[in-house]
Amino acid sequence: MRFPLSLTTSMVGYMAGKALKREKRFPLVLMLEPLHACNLTCTGCGRIREYSTTIKDRLTVEECLASVDEAGAPIVSICGGEPLIYPDIGALVQGILKRRKHIYLCTNGMFIQKRLDEFRPTSRFFFNVHLDGLEETHDVAVERRGVFKAAVEGIVAAKRRGFLVCTNTTIYKETDLAEIDRLFASLTKLGVDGFMLSPAYGYVAVKETNPQGAAEIFMTRDDIRAKFKEAEGLLKKYRMMSSPIYLEFLSGRRELTCTAWGNPTRNVKGWKGPCYLITDQHHATFREFMDNTPWDKYGYGKDPRCEHCMVHCGYEPSAALGVNKKLGDSLKMLLWQLS
């Protein structure tokens, strides 16, 4: 199977329960950011710029677990910042696993070896390592030499200890797809369990601080579709964790409507509204975030900030929930998960 059986059954059961209750909007993945501090200054990252005034703040483990309970989503993506510099990351992971949730710990990989003893292998836990290319390309993107090497060493150490590991790659305007092919082939040999992809998004924070640089790296909607159409053959070669429906959307073969509430974000300032990528308000509670966000005002063709966004956190939930559904989609998703 492409995913652990426990993840698939948890998600199916959760979605069926929501359907029976006729709930219109509910989260699938909680994006939990216990801190925004990071040891890197990646070129395309908006977090360290957007939250520069609260960069030293962090949520307590208790606040994080309360947020997991509030949202109720079956999957928690622990991100940031760099979560492996969060002092209590081991206790946080243990607390989430006790709640029978599944975790993707999103990391640049530099501290996996240092903190590996704080975790135990389980089908409910993935290290999700960010790699945007081979060594030279990746180290330029994160603005520090040696990061790629440290990340790969972390992946090797984690796989040796029996952990599940996937990688997440951001595709920029100048990304060389042949290089991504070589990257995925190399990572497959290391035993990596799957690959995620998402097009770079033009964060407002990045555009404001470096407008020329942003224009050079971020793609328009047409750019994204051309790039991913070119990548279709490549992606069929590897164990992709990005859904086939989302990839069809990226390549221009179908339309999807954003379901931003599917991946809500909780960070040091509250529940980030409306989405992981745009900040208009921070809400004190999850219920307030869900009930008071004017969802109909956002999305492609409604808000100019959404014009070129095709990022996974807005559109992968759409694929899972059957938004803009076509005949055969359910079978396609089932076969993908079982393959």
Image (tube, rainbow, N blue to C red):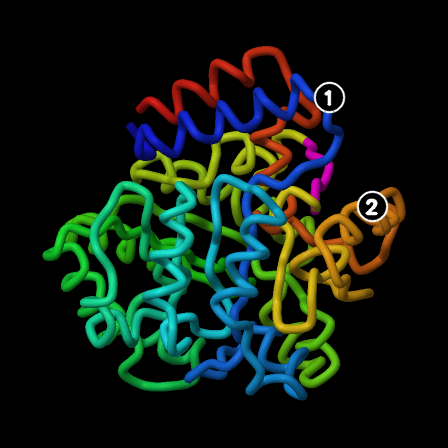
Helix, strand or loop under label 2: helix
Report crowding for label 2: few under 14, some 14 to 19, many 20 or more residues within 10 A (C-alpha).
few
- Would you say 105 lies left or right of 308 here? left
- Would you say 125 lies left or right of 79 here? left
Main SS, magenta region, reads: loop
Identify whether 187 is placed above or below 53: above
Report crowding for label 1: few under 14, some 14 to 19, many 20 or more residues within 10 A (C-alpha).
few
Residue underneath mark 2: 291
Quadrant of the rendering where the C terminus is positioned = top left
Residue at (35% x, 55% y) in the render = 167
Q: Disc 2, disc 1: CB below 8 Å?
A: no
Q: Residue furthest left?
A: 160
Residue underneath mark 1: 22
Is residue 258 a member of the stretch shown in magenta?
yes
Q: Amino acid at mark 1?
A: Arg
Q: Which residues are magenta?
A: 255-260
**Residue 278, quarter of picture:** bottom right
| The one of 297 and 139 positioned closer to us in this rendering | 297
Q: Amino acid at mark 2?
A: Asp
Closer to the chain start, of discs 2 and 1, is 1
- Would you say 62 lies left or right of 202 here? left
Residue 230 position in % (x across, y down): 48, 44
- Distance of mark 2 from mark 1, alpha carbons? 16 Å
